[in-house]
Image (spheres, rainbow, N blue to C red):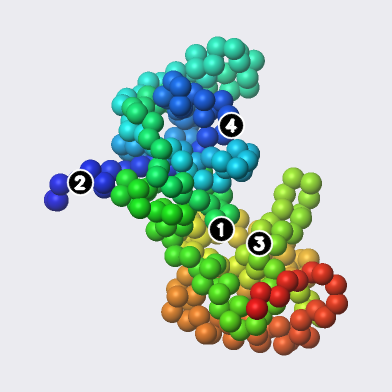
Amino acid sequence: MAETTKNDKIVLVAVLKNARDLKILLQEKWYHIPVKTCPKMKFKCVAFYQPALFGGSGKCIKYYSRVLNYSILTRKDLFPKELKHPNANDYYFKVNLGEINELAEPIKNIIPRRVCFGFTTLRRLLESKNILQLYGVAPTEQIIENALKRAGIKTKAQHYVIKNTQKRYRLDFAIFCNNGRIAIECDNKKAHSSKIQKVKDKTKNNFLRGKGWYVIHFSERKIIFGLDGCIKKVQSVVKILGGYQSQGKNFINTK
């Protein structure tokens, strides 16, 4: 077996939930992970994703660090001022870190993707420009978007459909026709192959179809190796649904 190189080290991608987490990271150099939800794979480094709540510094990874060691403590031991927290007695890994390194350029979540615990390598962390590259995911949405533009297909990217006050679904692309609406979903292999994700996708499909949406799913393989067929499929459904909606402001022309 070949010896693991420095840049092949496994990196856990973790999330900084709030400004306090960031302050602890930068000043005290540790991070906490619930024992019951901690990823099983061993990791040598941790990279930290800052979500949208960080404003101008959000939706990106700026910092990473090497793991020194860890200990198991209750949440009330980690945060003694929060004894009434509902998880106060739960156990957490306190991951002690070495020097906090800042990437030369932040790794951005350009095409919004939900980021939670995930794994990459140090090499990818140091070379990637966006989240898709970090996880080795093909930029299928960009490929489809460019193809839709070339074909003159009128779409709205990242359109949200509200289910209730606590839930909404994001569509990769929406097309509004005279006699219906089309939802186009780009299914990357890594993001949509798990059993849990398949159940979520089915629930989403059922909801959209119940609301009158015509749902089209394109797999990563179809997008990469059969792009022309994907576009012809969209054009065919647009024709069936009476062409593009000529009135209103529900679409933008991406041509």
Q: At which x and y percent is residue 177?
A: 77, 78
- The secondary structure type at the circle numbered 2 is loop
Disc 1 crowd, CA 10 A, few/some/many (<14, 14-19, 20+): some
Q: At which x and y percent is residue 183?
A: 68, 70
Disc 4 crowd, CA 10 A, few/some/many (<14, 14-19, 20+): few
* N-term mark: 2 or 3: 2
* N-term mark: 1 or 4: 4
- The secondary structure type at the circle numbered 4 is loop
Q: Amino acid at mark 4?
A: Asn
What is the spatial separation of the Cα atoms under label 1 and label 3, in whole angstroms?
9 Å
| Res. 215 in view | no
**Residue drawn at x 51%, y 38% as measured from the top left:** 15
Q: At which x and y percent is residue 38?
A: 44, 35
Quadrant that contains the C terminus: bottom right
**Residue drawn at x 76%, y 85% as measured from the top left:** 243
* N-term mark: 1 or 3: 1
Q: Amino acid at mark 1?
A: Ile
* Location of mark 3 (residue): 158
What is the spatial separation of the Cα atoms under label 1 and label 2, in whole angstroms?
31 Å
In the image, residue 161 sits, relative to residue 186, either above or below, namely above
**Residue drawn at x 40%, y 42% as measured from the top left:** 103
What is the spatial separation of the Cα atoms under label 3 and label 4, in whole angstroms?
25 Å
* Location of mark 4 (residue): 18
- The secondary structure type at the circle numbered 3 is strand
* Location of mark 2 (residue): 5
* Location of mark 1 (residue): 111
* N-term mark: 3 or 4: 4
